[in-house]
Structures are given as structure tokens and as C-alpha cells.
């Protein structure tokens, strides 16, 4: 018997059709999420892609295939950070960034770079999960919108509570109960080339940081932090 | 003429047979494991590194007092099929043990030690961590899990491995599962780039040529200052459009042998740029590694048609 032939393994013809069927199903699962993601509008998801995604949901989600592959898309946007600080004593005082606030992500304390990036992803996720404390009068008339907001708000509060109670946050604020800690959503806008090259603005300048409101944006304007 | 003599049914049957043969060769023609072994080594090392970093922040990421506790995790996954035994209530010692085993299996996978088992274990443990820590993940995790999933079905331990060196398991020169795994990596990559490109095409910055500047001007991403590109708006615009068109056309142009080297060369430049300037050295490196799936080991004397026998099938 030819030794070389022994060391080559062919797929048995009887199995090939089954393997191909499995491959086809798997490739449909790979396509299901981006197709559903891209065919989503304010009104609906294209029914055939929605159906495909729903049918394959257990496989797509558990196998971690549920990605839209939106890298730096549709546009590169501003970054979001989370500031951790002690709450003000007065209940209704404006939320301002304090000079002793800690941040995540933080290049100085979170090293190596991958660890920093993990915190950066959490701060972006926290910002994306934001649901305002209340709805406008117009939005309140839409029952489905209200239901979705209630669900989103519950999750946002749960995430907020989880972060403030965590060991890693409380470690930096020794002796402080978690209900005395507040998290601020911070945005760093992207500067234009003119602002950097003509006006000499540095992209790391913390004076540009914006504290995002927790309520309706129309009611509470964002505040520029002013921290040096 | 021949088709007329056969009649329409015969011609159709002939075409069907041609199609089936091409498909059969595309997915099943046995190939060697050298390229997959390279991908295995890089992916195994990256899996080990990923779990090392999770271990560095163990208390922050795992246990009942982590940044994402069991209640928040349950709400996040309330309507999703994301089961993991790491559910937010795991004791720290258990999470630590899990991460140490995952790190070890990543290293064993890289070394090619009982590869058929350690690759599956490394993929599974990384998947369990991914479901536990979803808010902390990004493109790196998508690529690493994608590669380790496909490597699990391959015979990537048959080259450059302890398995081969010391005969730990039976190895083969060529195996059909190497071809299948290579094809799945290639096709999955095409999906990633195609939709990545379509996503960018929805944004105006990728059309007016400013996306390169606004990527460079993000302080949180920046690892090496590239804001000098703002002084050369035409260069920034050309790079922006080159990235956009390369990404959209990747899925079509990476198959013909004429265009493949160019497409892969641009992939190398784009991902090296992401790694060096945008602070994602791990992600950039793994994307370059994934593109290795389109390399063909040297095969003198073979001049097959590009589409009928695309890369990998004619080894």
C-alpha cells in the first residue's frame, strides 16, 4: 500500500452531503445577524431577514455570531468615559465633574492596553445603554415606546447599581457607601483639523469633556467640565 | 454542439455535475495544515493573553461584586441564548480556575499539544467568558472566537506541533478538514469585510474623506499620534476612500489570483495601521492572522484557473 496515500484523508462521499448541508446552515447563521441588522429601519426589520435571524437565534447567539460588523461605522464618533465621584450633599445641585473624580477608561492605571480597552468598551456600553430618567409628553403617548423605555431604564439602573457596588469602584472611594457614589457619563467630542492645527487644541485636553445629562436632553443641557 | 446532441436535460445534468465537482473540490479536496498551524499558534497565544488580562482584573470582572453583577447580567441576556456557567454568581476561586485552565489550553493549542482537544477546550472556555463579560468585548473577541471555532474542526495540529514532533496523536500530510476549516475562515472573513464596508458606506465621513482624520483624532483610541494627517487633507481623503472601497470589494477581489496579493497587501497595511496608531494591536494582529487563510503554500507547476480552484484547493 502506498504510504503517501495513507497519510491523506478524504471525506467519505456518503458524508459529504451532510457536511455541506451543515456548512450551508452555518453560513446562513453567519449572515443572519448582519442581514437583520442592516435591514432594520425605524419601522421594521425586513421580514425575511427577521425570520431567518429569529429561526437561527439559539445557534447565532450562543455561538457568538450575533455581530453587525460595524467597525468605525457609520462614522467615527466621540468617545465616552465614565467618571466616578462622591455625590453632592444637596439633592438638586447640578451634576458637575469634580477635580478628584476617577475615570474609566484610564491609561495610567489600566495596563496593559488590552485591559484599558476592556474598560473603554464598558464605558461605551454604559453610554449606549443610557435611558433618560423621564420621557417627554409626546413620547408618553406612544405605549410601545413607553414599554421599551421602561425596560431600557430598568437595565440602565441595574448596570449603574452594579458598577457603583463593585469592588473595583469602591476600592478607590474607601469608607463610602455605594449610594453615595455617582457615575457621570462623559463625552469627548472629536476636534476638527482646524481646531488642532490652527487653534492649537490638544485632543487630550480634559477641558473639552462634556458631562452628559441623565434627564431629557432638551431639559438639561450638557455642561462642559472645566477640569484642568 | 455537444450540448445540443445531449439535449437540454443532458446539458443541465452536465452543468450540475460541473458545479457539484467544483463545490466538492472547494470544500473537500485534502490540503496540508501548514497555514492553519500558523493561525493556530497565533490564535492560541492570543487566547492565553486574553485570559491573562482577565486574570489581572479578576475581582473587577468576575464574582458577585464585579462591575457586571448577576442581576445586570441576567437583564442583559434576558431574551438571548447566552447561557454560560459563569453567570455572575460564580465564586472568585472558580473564575480564577476557569481562567487559568483557559490560559493553559490556549498555550497548549499554540504548542500543538493534544491539539484536537486543547483547541476545542480553548474555544469553549473563551466562549463561556465571552457570554459572561459581553459589555467588555470588541472585535478582537469576535475574531479570536471565529478562528478558534474553525480551527476546532481542522487538523491544525498536524504541522508545527508537539503532536507531530513527538507523535502524541496520529497526524496526516493532507486532510479534508483542513480545507473545510480554511474555506469557512475565508467565507466568514468575506462576510465581515463586506458588511464592515457597507456599514462605513452609510456614513458621510467615509464619503467626504474625513473619516481617517476623525479616527486619528480620537484620544481614547490613539496609541501613536497620527494627527499630522490633518495637515494633508487630500492624503487623508485618499486613505479614507481606499479603506472604504477595499473593504467593500474584498469579498470579490480576494479570490482571483490576479488581485489577491493586492487585496491582502492592503489588508496588512490597514490592520497594521489600526494596531500601531489606534491602540488595538491585538485586534489588528489577529485580523492579519485571519487573512493568512488566503495564502497558498508554494505549489510549483500548478496553473489552475483562479475561480475554479481558488487558494488552498490546489495544494
Image: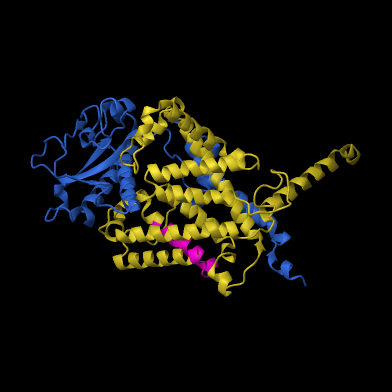
Chain colours: A blue, B yellow
Quick one: A77 or A142, which is closer to the camera? A77
- Quarter residue A228 falls in: top left
Quick one: A51 or B233, which is closer to the camera? B233
Which x, y percent locates residue B161?
A: 54, 67
Which x, y percent locates residue B127?
A: 44, 57
Which x, y percent locates residue B16?
A: 77, 45
Point out the stretch of residues depicted in magenta: B110-129
In the rendered image, the vertical position of residue A49 relative to residue B86, given as above or below:
above
Which x, y percent locates residue A69?
A: 47, 42
Which secondary structure dominates the residues rendered in magenta?
helix
Is residue B112 rendered magenta in the image? yes
In the image, is B302 to the left or to the right of A191? Answer: right
Residue at the image position 13 percent from the left and 48 percent from the top: A180
In the image, is A191 to the left or to the right of A15? Answer: left
Residue B63 visible in the picture: no
In the rendered image, the vertical position of residue A121 relative to residue A131, given as above or below:
below
Residue at the image position 21 percent from the left and 28 percent from the top: A221
Rendered-image quadrant of the N terminus of chain B? top right
In the rendered image, the vertical position of residue B251 relative to residue B282, given as above or below:
above
In the image, is B23 to the left or to the right of A110? Answer: right
In the rendered image, the vertical position of residue A166 relative to residue B99, given as above or below:
above
Amino acid at each position: 500500500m502506498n504510504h503517501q496515500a495513507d497519510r491523506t484523508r478524504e471525506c467519505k462521499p456518503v458524508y459529504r452531503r451532510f457536511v455541506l448541508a451543515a456548512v450551508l446552515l452555518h453560513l446562513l447563521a453567519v449572515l443572519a445577524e448582519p442581514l437583520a441588522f442592516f435591514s432594520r429601519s425605524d419601522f421594521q426589520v425586513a421580514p425575511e431577514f427577521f425570520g431567518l435571524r429569529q429561526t437561527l437565534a439559539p445557534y447565532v447567539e450562543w455561538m457568538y455570531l450575533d455581530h453587525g460588523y460595524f467597525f468605525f461605522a457609520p462614522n467615527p464618533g466621540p468617545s465616552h468615559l465614565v467618571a466616578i465621584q462622591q455625590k453632592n450633599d444637596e439633592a438638586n445641585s447640578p451634576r458637575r465633574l469634580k477635580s478628584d473624580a476617577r475615570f474609566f477608561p484610564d491609561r495610567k492605571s489600566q495596563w496593559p492596553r488590552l485591559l484599558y480597552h476592556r474598560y473603554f468598551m464598558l464605558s461605551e456600553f454604559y453610554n449606549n445603554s443610557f435611558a433618560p430618567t423621564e420621557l417627554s409628553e409626546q413620547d408618553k403617548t406612544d405605549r410601545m415606546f413607553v414599554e421599551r423605555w421602561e425596560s431600557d431604564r430598568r437595565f440602565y439602573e441595574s448596570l449603574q447599581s452594579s458598577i457603583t457596588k463593585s469592588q473595583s469602584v469602591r476600592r478607590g472611594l474607601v469608607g463610602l457607601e455605594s449610594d453615595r457614589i455617582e457615575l457621570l457619563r462623559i463625552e469627548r467630542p472629536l476636534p476638527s483639523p482646524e481646531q488642532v492645527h490652527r487653534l492649537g487644541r490638544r485632543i487630550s485636553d480634559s477641558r473639552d469633556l462634556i458631562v452628559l445629562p441623565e434627564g431629557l436632553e432638551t431639559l438639561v443641557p450638557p455642561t462642559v467640565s472645566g477640569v484642568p | 454542439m455537444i450540448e445540443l446532441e445531449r439535449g437540454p436535460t443532458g446539458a443541465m445534468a452536465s452543468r450540475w455535475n460541473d458545479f457539484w465537482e467544483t463545490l466538492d473540490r472547494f470544500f473537500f479536496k485534502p490540503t496540508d495544515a501548514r497555514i492553519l498551524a500558523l493561525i493556530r499558534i497565533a490564535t492560541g497565544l492570543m487566547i492565553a493573553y486574553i485570559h491573562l488580562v482577565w486574570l489581572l482584573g479578576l475581582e473587577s470582572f468576575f464574582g458577585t461584586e464585579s462591575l457586571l453583577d448577576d442581576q445586570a447580567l441576567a437583564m442583559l441576556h434576558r431574551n438571548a441564548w447566552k447561557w454560560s456557567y459563569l453567570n455572575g454568581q460564580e465564586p472568585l476561586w472558580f473564575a480564577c480556575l476557569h481562567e487559568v485552565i483557559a490560559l493553559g489550553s490556549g498555550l497548549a493549542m499554540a504548542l500543538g499539544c493534544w491539539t484536537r482537544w486543547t483547541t476545542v477546550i480553548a474555544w469553549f472556555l473563551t466562549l463561556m467568558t465571552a457570554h459572561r463579560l459581553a459589555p467588555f468585548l470588541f472585535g478582537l473577541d469576535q475574531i479570536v472566537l471565529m478562528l478558534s471555532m474553525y480551527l476546532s474542526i481542522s487538523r491544525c495540529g498536524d504541522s508545527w506541533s508537539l503532536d507531530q514532533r513527538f507523535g502524541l496523536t496520529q497526524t496526516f500530510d493532507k486532510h479534508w478538514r483542513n480545507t473545510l476549516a480554511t474555506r469557512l475562515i475565508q467565507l466568514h472573513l468575506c462576510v465581515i469585510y463586506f458588511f464592515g464596508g457597507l456599514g462605513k458606506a452609510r456614513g458621510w465621513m467615509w464619503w467626504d474623506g474625513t473619516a481617517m482624520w476623525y479616527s486619528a483624532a480620537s484620544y481614547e483610541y490613539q496609541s501613536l499620534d497620527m494627527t499630522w494627517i490633518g495637515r494633508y487633507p487630500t492624503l487623508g481623503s485618499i486613505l479614507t476612500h481606499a479603506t472604504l472601497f477595499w473593504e467593500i470589494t474584498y469579498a470579490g477581489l480576494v479570490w482571483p489570483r490576479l488581485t489577491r496579493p493586492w487585496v491582502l497587501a492592503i489588508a496588512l497595511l490597514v490592520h497594521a495601521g489600526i494596531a500601531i496608531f489606534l491602540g488595538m494591536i491585538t485586534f489588528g494582529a489577529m485580523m492579519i492572522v485571519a487573512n493568512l487563510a488566503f495564502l497558498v503554500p508554494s505549489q510549483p507547476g500548478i496553473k489552475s484557473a483562479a475561480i475554479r480552484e481558488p487558494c488552498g484547493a490546489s495544494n
